[in-house]
Image (spheres, rainbow, N blue to C red):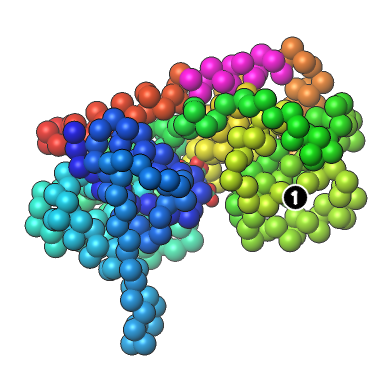
Amino acid sequence: MAKIGITCYPTVGGSGVIATELGKLLAEKGHEIHFVASQVPFRLNRVYPNIYYHEVEVSNYPVFQHPPYDLALANKMAEVINREELDILHVHYAMPHAICAILAKQMAKRDVKIITTLHGTDITVLGIDSSLKQMIKFGIEQSDKVTAVSESLVQQTQDQLSTDKPIEVIYNFVDEREYYQKPSYSLREDYCIKEEEKVVIHISNFRKVKRVPEVVHAFSKIAAEVPAKLLLVGDGPEYSDVHQLVKDLELEGQVLFLGKQENVSDLLSISDLKLLLSEKESFGLVLLEAMACGVPCIGSNIGGIPEVIDHGETGYIAELGNVDQVAYFALKMLTDEDLMDKLSVNAKQMVETKFASGTILTQYEELYERVLNND
Ligand code: GMT
């Protein structure tokens, strides 16, 4: 059994979820897990034997123009590496976590192995700030092993950084004990959803890249043909604009703004169709969450989305920005019960096979074994 340090952004969406869920599963298998982060990761919501949390405290002396989070993190990592005798430090995001881990390893003077998992936003950041390119490349190349959550992200990383560092794909997963189709029919009544109405759902952090206005435009076309409600779950910078758009399109009665929600599996369980029309998405963990609850998805043809949705089998892939095509696929699905049943069964099966948590956990454990054997 290994002693593994894990660092992630504790409050940021999918990457924090994956890091935490992985830590929980590894702990269940008997590994000793040490989270090093600035806050308790939000999915670490009870006491777990074998899991320890080490908080990074960031000082804010007046001489510092910006609180030095990165340095405080490296310092805490070094402290934990030494005191807890860590074998592995698994960081999620190269920027800045891989760089902090490399610095911490040098400070700690212990042969801890560094594994970096790329989740996508590093590469997005690169598109905005090329001055960080060398730093991200350094973090990736100095890691003992690097993984990415999709083939598409491997390709993008290698292209953008011109690196030949091997990057292994280990897909994301969901905890099947939490994400399954729940019999939560009363929730439909609570939200005043009529029996004949179809439920379309979108879950995101409402950043521009998620293109939520297109979800609303597609829904408007869907709702013109079949009785339907749209559940918008999450919060973020585009929320107010989306609210205004819903007003302008006179869809207020059909669109429910639910804000941030903890138990999305309950909401997914009353949904018929999930839309994710992002322009950048290295994986799209929310797609997997939906599929696990038997909800077929329509996603855009970008990033890792086509690796998650099998076009025509578990959902549909639409051209980025083509709202008419999204509405076409949605109506095809929502008006054909047999097709919906097939897609729903296939989606659940895909989660149980290609993305099964047990399979993904084994892939990470094998990776840890190889890195510890200097293989
Ligand atoms: O998509 C976001 O805005 C959040 C971001 C994160 O840090 O959690 O998500 C990234 O990592 C997730 C987990 O691997 C992936 O499912 C998301 O596709 C990825 N987001 C992007 O690539 C934009």
Residue 346 horizontal side relative to residue 102, left or right: right
Dividing the picture into quadrants, the one containing residue 72 is bottom left
Residue 90 horizontal side relative to residue 14, left or right: left
State the residue at coordinates (32%, 32%): 28
Image location (x, y in percent) of residue 328: 78, 29
Q: Which quarter of the rendering shows the N terminus?
A: top left
Decide whether residue 344 is among the magenta residues.
Answer: yes
Image location (x, y in percent) of residue 46: 43, 45
In the rendered image of this protein, does residue 100 appear above or below residue 300? below
Q: Secondary structure at mark 1?
A: strand
State the residue at coordinates (87%, 55%): 248
Principal SS element in the magenta part? helix
Q: How many residues crowd mark 1 within 10 Å: few (<14), some (14–19), many (20+)?
A: some
Dividing the picture into quadrants, the one containing residue 318 is top right
Q: Which quarter of the rendering shows the C terminus?
A: top left
Image location (x, y in percent) of residue 371: 18, 36
Image location (x, y in percent) of residue 74: 25, 63
Q: In the depicted view, which residue is nearer to us: 286 or 138?
A: 286
Identify the amino acid type marked 1: Phe
Residue 77 horizontal side relative to residue 168, left or right: left
Residue 222 appearing in the image: no
State the residue at coordinates (14%, 49%): 85
Span of residues in magenta: 340-352
Residue 106 horizontal side relative to residue 280, left or right: left
Decide whether residue 270 is among the magenta residues.
Answer: no
Residue 289 appearing in the image: yes
Q: Is mark 1 within 8 Å of ligand 1?
A: no
Q: In the depicted view, which residue is nearer to us: 48 or 259?
A: 48
State the residue at coordinates (71%, 46%): 232
In the rendered image of this protein, does residue 228 appear above or below residue 242? above
Q: In the depicted view, which residue is nearer to us: 364 or 35?
A: 35
- What residue sits right under mark 1 in the picture? 257
